[in-house]
Amino acid sequence: MSTTDNAPAISKRSFTCPHCGAFAGQHWFHVHIREVHSNGGIPPSQGDLVRVAHTSNSDQVYIAYATKMLHARLSFMAPEPLAAGRTYELFNSAVSRCGSCDKIALWVGDKLVFPESPLRPAAPLEVPEALRADYDEAAKVLPHSAKASAALSRRCLQTLLRDKGYKQHNLGNAIQALLDANTLPSGLAEIVDAIRNVGNFAAHAMKDTNTGAILDVEPAEAEWNLEVLEGLFDHFYVGPAKNAKRLQALNTKLNQGGKPAVKS
């Protein structure tokens, strides 16, 4: 089954959790709201919550409640069937709870509104942390700002190239140096080469010289940058890591059989 098939959706009993990343069964709930009566009919302020959370003689239940609210955590509370205040079902909304991590997701119609779910899976763990952070942020902000996403992905690309020894100041020159090295598979080389055309570097020189600048983007530029990064991640980090594990497993078997190890 493909990653897309496992993506969160309102019509599924199981999907990849947007919190923990596990493919797990989901328990669905209706959403009910209750009229606020305490504190003059308004929710508690941040100051109120801080005072409760840091007052030693406060009830432990209220301390836990205040702490969760301060950290903006959506979670289940014990039911209060006799609580004062009118209760309503919130129409066209639902909550799913992950069977793996127990965290909840909030849906309006068929759209996941909490937590924000990027359109792409997170960068593989084999990728260096700094690159993963930029890539994941670029994927997360893409639905909201293609400009910001493209700026982050350009910076991520330049960081990757420098990590691999291509330290040219201009991104376009670093891309050309990578292509000139003739180390990429032909298909990957073609999509890397297209970055400069898709991003129209000729018309937007800042994309070449100041990769982190938030500038106007060409159609599909932000998405293309992420596609290229995925291919480069697989080539430079994921593939070699998998091959190293295979070689290690093979050498373990050879060693057990009294045979010489295969050199990498």
Image: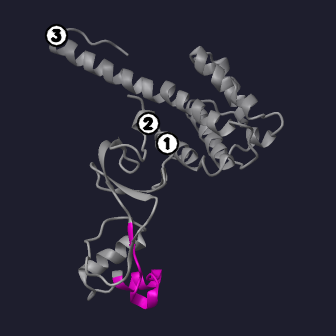
* C-alpha span from label 3 to label 1: 41 Å
In x, y percent, where is residue 10? Answer: 42, 47
**Residue at horizontal 41%, vertical 48%?**
18
In x, y percent, where is residue 212? Answer: 68, 47
* Callout 1 amino acid: Arg
* Dot 3 crowding, Cα within 10 Å, few <14, some 14–19, many 20+: few
Residue 54 visible, this angle: no
The magenta stretch spans residue 147: no
Residue 124's disc is 2
186 to the left or right of 26: right
135 to the left or right of 210: left
Q: Which residues are magenta?
A: 32-52
* C-alpha span from label 2 to label 1: 8 Å
Q: Residue furthest bottom?
A: 40
* Callout 3 amino acid: Gly
- Say if 232 sits above or below 6 in the image: above
* Callout 2 amino acid: Pro
* Dot 2 crowding, Cα within 10 Å, few <14, some 14–19, many 20+: some
Q: Residue furthest top?
A: 259
In x, y percent, where is residue 200? Answer: 78, 34
Identify the element where label 2 is drawn. loop
**Residue at horizontal 46%, vertical 36%?**
127
In x, y percent, where is residue 20? Answer: 35, 48
Residue 258's disc is 3
Location of residue 155 by image quarter: top right
Q: Which residue is mark 1?
A: 132
* C-alpha span from label 3 to label 2: 35 Å
Q: Nearer the viewer, residue 172 or 101?
A: 101
